Image (cartoon, rainbow, N blue to C red):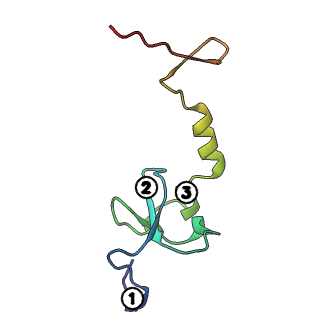
Amino acid sequence: MNANKPFKKKIKPFNFMLIGQEKNDVIPCLPYDRSNSGIQYKPFVDYKTYIASDKFPLPSDAYWHTLEDVLTQYVRHNDNKFDYDSEGIAHRKHIIVN
């Protein structure tokens, strides 16, 4: 990511970075930018393997979660503190301590 960049633009220790959530076995990682608009189209590096986004088979936006993805995961997450009846309604579990 630092190749062919002047020192001022290079990522140095303690610089801030943007790191996405894992999707398609890739964790996108790129330099911090105040403007988050269009972030899914910017080049990035995989946090685990250090492979640049231009080496991946899918376009860069395929490795970022949309707000719809996040909200769907939140709604479908079964919480261990609740039991669900046949209609999908959650009821708080009661704990009995011996």
Query: Residue tagged by mark 3?
Result: 64
Q: Which element type, helix, strand or loop, lies under badge 3?
A: loop
Question: Which badge, 2 or 1, is on the more N-terminal residue?
Answer: 1
Q: Give x and y (percent) for residue 19.
A: 46, 61
Query: Residue tagged by mark 1?
Result: 4
| Tag 2 and tag 3, C-beta contact below 8 Å | no
Could you tell me how far apart the alpha carbons at marks 2 and 1 are, in whole angstroms?
A: 24 Å
Q: Residue placed at 57% from the left, 39% from the top?
A: 73
Q: Which element type, helix, strand or loop, lies under badge 1?
A: loop
Q: Is residue 76 above or below residue 82?
A: below
Q: Give x and y (percent) for residue 34.
A: 57, 74
User: Is 69 on the left-hand or right-hand side of 56?
Assistant: right
Q: Residue placed at 36% from the left, 84% from the top?
A: 3
Q: In the depicted view, which residue is nearer to us: 11 or 82?
A: 82
Q: Which element type, helix, strand or loop, lies under badge 2?
A: loop
Image quarter of residue 59: bottom right
* Quarter of the rendering occupied by the C terminus: top left
Q: Is residue 81 above or below residue 59?
A: above
Query: Residue tagged by mark 2?
Result: 26
Are there few (<14), some (14-19), or many (20+) residues within 10 Å of tag 2?
many
* Quarter of the rendering occupied by the N terminus: bottom left
Could you tell me how far apart the alpha carbons at marks 1 and 3 are, in whole angstroms?
A: 26 Å
Question: Which badge, 2 or 3, is on the more N-terminal residue?
Answer: 2
| Tag 2 and tag 1, C-beta contact below 8 Å | no
Question: Which badge, 1 or 3, is on the more N-terminal residue?
Answer: 1
Q: Residue placed at 53% from the left, 59% from the top?
A: 58
Are there few (<14), some (14-19), or many (20+) residues within 10 Å of tag 1?
few
